[in-house]
Image (cartoon, rainbow, N blue to C red):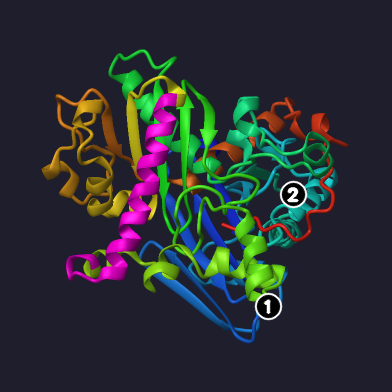
Amino acid sequence: MTDPAAEARVLVINSGSSSLKFQLLDPETGTVDASGIVERIGLERGVASLTAGQQESSFEGDVPDHGQAMTIVQSLFTDVGLSFADDRIRAVGHRVVQGGARYSSPVLIDEQVRWDIHDLGKLAPLHNYAAVDGIDGAKALLPDVPHIAVFDTAFFTALPEAAANYALNREVAREYRVRRYGAHGTSHQYISRTVSDRLAAEGRDVSSLRQIVMHLGNGASASAVLGEQAVETSMGLTPLEGLVMGTRTGDIDPTIYLHLHRRAGLDAPEIDDILNKRSGMIGMCGMSDFRDITAAVEDGDEAAILAMDVYVHRLRKYLGSYTFVLGGLDVLTFTAGIGENVPMVRERVLTGLEDLGIELDLEANAVRSKEARVISTPASKTLVMVVPTNEELSIAQQAAEVARERRDGDVPRGAEDARGADCVRGTEGTRGED
């Protein structure tokens, strides 16, 4: 007889402001049974698609809200012979962008947790409110399955105080909960642990391993990890801080807000739109897809060359500063769409660092693969790797663990311990998208 636990699946839900991504997978093996997306939620005409092995299903029509989006997902599953009633779905893991300082681990979603996620929407309005809608829609269809929130900020809740705090007026910072929350934490945690596990399996002591992870996608972030603990991250109160990104400025003099308001007559929403949606690579060269950017660089396009130079310069600044924060560097890992697939970026970041113990293997760097791989030379003191990220698998694994603890009677304490803590005030206009 087959062990039911061996067939258990987790449904992972990632609700955005106008989209809902989903994936049904085995948290033990990483096998994906089905995946898809519902797009244009709340807009005039929505679309949805699902892939399950060789089978596909699609939808086009009205998708007024995330509740209806979940109903459409259920219908797509039925089209390919999968059912939400299937008892193999043992848990639903919800990606939640902002968990504030209160949630340092995944938690079972009850009414208090739901309220907290909504309250923290003041820090991430484009994502947390959508996450609540996705939670409500999924719970309506799967009321008897445990729903678990996995927070993108959780990995960074234990940053050292020197890294977590801004040099802002103390009372103002406390009153409005202004601190570095970070983002992409699920990816940074997954990558750093994957690297540690690989090196540990080779017999290396990883208890004080010094790692830097570069998560380079349309949104980009860096982290410094000592052992299993994140000690720095580039994103801050919102995902605007840090590296140059597809459409975001990254680090910028904050008085530019005032300058644009006073000199250009722009209001806060207009400036917010410029810094978050019309800057970064697309603002500098008119492109955000690095396939187009690298081709333009090779063709001698001056705007693309400058944009690439600015992008790489910022990466090198963070690489250098985080190496000093860690007191040295054992492993540097590139991940996410650009980090995994654009050799030009990796080569430009690492060229000329041989005296600092980083020696890139150009042939290895040029290889395209979906597998984790080493791209430094054997002589390099710092190991340089490319490791594909898998946030869905990480969410599924964390959700499965919480569901197991619930079944065993060991309910995670995250929600109960956090109740009544750090309610956010007066930050309704703060962006938190990614």
Q: Which region shows up in magenta?
A: 297-324
Q: Is residue 87 left or right of residue 128?
A: left
Q: Residue at x 62, y 53 (%)?
A: 254
Main SS, magenta residues: helix
Which residue type carries mark 2?
Answer: Asp
Whether the residues at callouts 2 and 1 have beta carbons within 8 Å, the answer is no
Q: Percent position (x, y) of residue 414?
A: 74, 32
Instruction: Residue 23: say if magenta.
Output: no
Which residue type carries mark 1?
Answer: Gly
Q: Which residue is mark 1?
A: 42
User: Which of 5/271 is in front?
Assistant: 271
Instruction: Residue 300: say if magenta.
Output: yes
**SS label for mark 1:** loop
User: Which of 136/254 is in front?
Assistant: 254
Q: Look at the image and tell me whether residue 214 can be seen.
A: yes
Q: Is residue 36 left or right of residue 55?
A: right
Q: Which residue is mark 2?
A: 144
Q: Look at the image and tell me whether residue 71 can be seen.
A: no
- Against 71, residue 432 (above or below) is above
Dot 2, how many residues are within 10 Å of its Cα: few (below 14), some (14-19), or many (20+)?
few
Q: Residue at x 82, y 32 (%)?
A: 416
- Mark 2 and mark 1: Cα distance apart in space: 28 Å
Q: Residue at x 75, y 35 (%)?
A: 102
From this viewpoint, which residue is outermost toward the right? 420
**SS label for mark 2:** loop
Q: Percent position (x, y) of residue 420?
A: 88, 37
From this viewpoint, which residue is outermost toward the front? 263
- Against 404, residue 279 (above or below) is below
Tell me where residue 204 sits by quadrant: top left
Q: Percent position (x, y) of residue 195?
A: 36, 30
